Image (cartoon, rainbow, N blue to C red):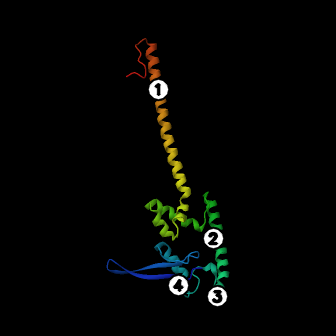
């Protein structure tokens, strides 16, 4: 339901030169909080292409259609949800054709962003602010499975290391016994593996 007017340009001074940067203003439906998201260069040309020749109140993306611009908000929301579901359906088909065995949807990008930011910074409060979560527990739910898996992975690694240590001791014990048996066969004085 994004409108062309949500794509705004700002001027910044970089190295004593004016540089235009674009931001996308978005308001969360649940919280009604507005965020200004920096539009990265890779996405800017796509958004400017969609905005070209349109009025500020026109929908930015083509799948809403001009006929929905003046419809009641409830009708617009239904159309937007239907289009989102269709895009999610296409993403699932793409994932399947690429052999990706994970559920892929537009919302997956939000989770991926959160996971990458957490991995890079280790700061759950920064992730919370970036996702505009009112409660830290909401953000922590994003990582609940991952942190449980992380603990499981650490436990498995510790178990493997201890298991390898046991195997090494057992191998050394067998080697010691073999040497003792070999020396005994040759009639030489044997020393117990436990003796220095």
Q: Which residue is mark 3?
A: 70
- Local crowd at mark 3 within 10 Å, few (<14), some, or many (≥20)? few
Find the distance from the CA under tag 4 to the CA under tag 3.
Answer: 16 Å
**Residue at x 50% of width, y 74% of height:** 43
Q: Position of residue 58 (x, y in %)?
A: 58, 85
**Circle nearer the N terminus (3, 1):** 3
Q: Is residue 151 above or below residue 36?
A: above
**Circle nearer the N terminus (4, 2):** 4
Q: Which residue is mark 4?
A: 5
**Which of pointers 3 and 1 indicates the residue nearer the eye?**
1
**Residue at x 50% of width, y 41% of height:** 160
Secondary element at tag 3: loop
In this rendering, the count of numbered labels is 4
Asked if the residue under mark 4 is in contact with the one under mark 1, i.e. CB atoms within 8 Å, the reply is no
Asked if the residue under mark 3 is in contact with the one under mark 4, i.e. CB atoms within 8 Å, the reply is no
Find the distance from the CA under tag 2 to the CA under tag 3.
Answer: 24 Å
Asked if the residue under mark 2 is in contact with the one under mark 4, i.e. CB atoms within 8 Å, the reply is no
The image quarter in which residue 50 lies: bottom right
**Circle nearer the N terminus (1, 4):** 4
**Circle nearer the N terminus (4, 3):** 4
Q: Position of residue 37 (x, y in %)?
A: 48, 75
- Local crowd at mark 1 within 10 Å, few (<14), some, or many (≥20)? some
Asked if the residue under mark 1 is in contact with the one under mark 3, i.e. CB atoms within 8 Å, the reply is no
Q: Which residue is mark 2?
A: 87
**Circle nearer the N terminus (2, 1):** 2
**Which of pointers 4 and 2 indicates the residue nearer the eye?**
4
Disc number for residue 173: 1
Find the distance from the CA under tag 3 to the CA under tag 1.
Answer: 83 Å
**Which of pointers 2 and 1 indicates the residue nearer the eye?**
1
Q: Is residue 27 above or below residue 124?
A: below
């Amino acid at each position: 339901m994004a409108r062309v007017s949500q794509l705004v340009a700002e001027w910044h001074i970089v190295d004593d030169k004016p540089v235009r940067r674009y931001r996308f203003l978005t308001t969360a439906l649940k919280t009604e909080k507005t965020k200004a998201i920096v539009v990265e260069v890779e996405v800017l040309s796509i958004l400017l292409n969609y905005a070209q020749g349109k009025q500020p109140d026109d929908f930015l993306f083509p799948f809403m259609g001009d006929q929905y611009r003046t419809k009641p908000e409830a009708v617009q929301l239904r159309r937007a949800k239907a289009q989102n579901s269709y895009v999610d359906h296409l993403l699932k088909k793409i994932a399947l054709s690429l052999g990706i065995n994970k559920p892929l949807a537009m919302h997956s990008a939000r989770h991926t962003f959160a996971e990458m930011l957490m991995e890079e910074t280790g700061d759950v409060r920064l992730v919370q602010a970036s996702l505009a979560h009112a409660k830290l527990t909401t953000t922590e739910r994003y990582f609940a499975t991952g942190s449980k898996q992380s603990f499981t992975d650490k436990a498995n690694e510790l178990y493997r290391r201890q298991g390898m240590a046991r195997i090494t001791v057992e191998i050394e014990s067998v080697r010691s016994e073999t040497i003792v048996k070999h020396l005994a066969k040759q009639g030489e004085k044997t020393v117990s593996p436990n003796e220095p």
